[in-house]
Amino acid sequence: MNKTAYDECYYDSMIQKGRYLFKLIARNTENPFQVIETYMRSNYRKAMDLGNPLYLNKTPKQILGELGVKVNLEAPISDTWDEFILEWMSDIYTYMQWKYNLPSERIVEKIRPEDLYEKYSPLHETSVANGVDKLRKIYNI
């Protein structure tokens, strides 16, 4: 059995944090896929992947600030990007990284955000775990 990336006690908060982070990205940037990819490749994310509690406990606003993204917490829901899909994407990336202890950079290299966004239907109808297993087979991860 694979060892998870970090202690399970952080997993639920990482799911919630990721969902909010991706929604803030969609509400505050013109190209959320590029910002998501930048985040997944960042040194900040690498520290999270390694289970560093200092980084695992940062807020989405702190994470975006580190990436140089100015956040307006009052920004309206995006008319362009479906936030339910973005939440699902965050769940997929978070679970895949955590469960299989894979570097986020490697995951996003194989499954680009714009491609994952398009895979929402029909994969969202299955569990996140099953969706991740299907994506790992499709993208040979």
Image (tube, rainbow, N blue to C red):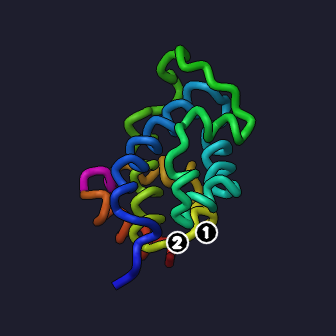
Instruction: Please give the range of residues in magenta.
Output: 122-126
Task: Give the vertical position of 99 relative to 126 (above or below).
Answer: below
**Residues tagged 1 and 2 counted as in contact (Cβ below 8 A):** yes
The quadrant of the picture occupied by the N terminus is: bottom left
Marks 1, 2: nearer the viewer:
2
Q: In this view, does 20 lie to the left or right of 112?
A: left
The secondary structure that dominates the magenta segment is loop
Task: Give the vertical position of 62 relative to 15 (above or below).
Answer: above
Question: Label 1 crowding class (10 Å Cα cut-off): few <14, some 14-19, many 20+?
Answer: few
Q: Where is residue 53? Give x, y as percent.
A: 52, 56
In the rendered image, which residue does mark 1 sit on?
Answer: 106
Asked if residue 34 is among those painted magenta in the image, a careful observer would answer: no
What's the residue at 70%, 40% (across, down)? 66
Q: Where is residue 103? Give x, y as percent.
A: 58, 68
Q: What element carries label 1?
A: helix
In the rendered image, which residue does mark 2 sit on?
Answer: 102
> Residue farthest to the bottom?
1
Give the amino acid type for the residue marked by disc 2 in the picture.
Leu
Give the amino acid type for the residue marked by disc 1 in the picture.
Arg
Q: Is mark 2 on a helix, strand or loop?
A: loop
Task: Give the vertical position of 109 relative to 10 (above or below).
Answer: below
What's the residue at 35%, 71% (across, down)? 133
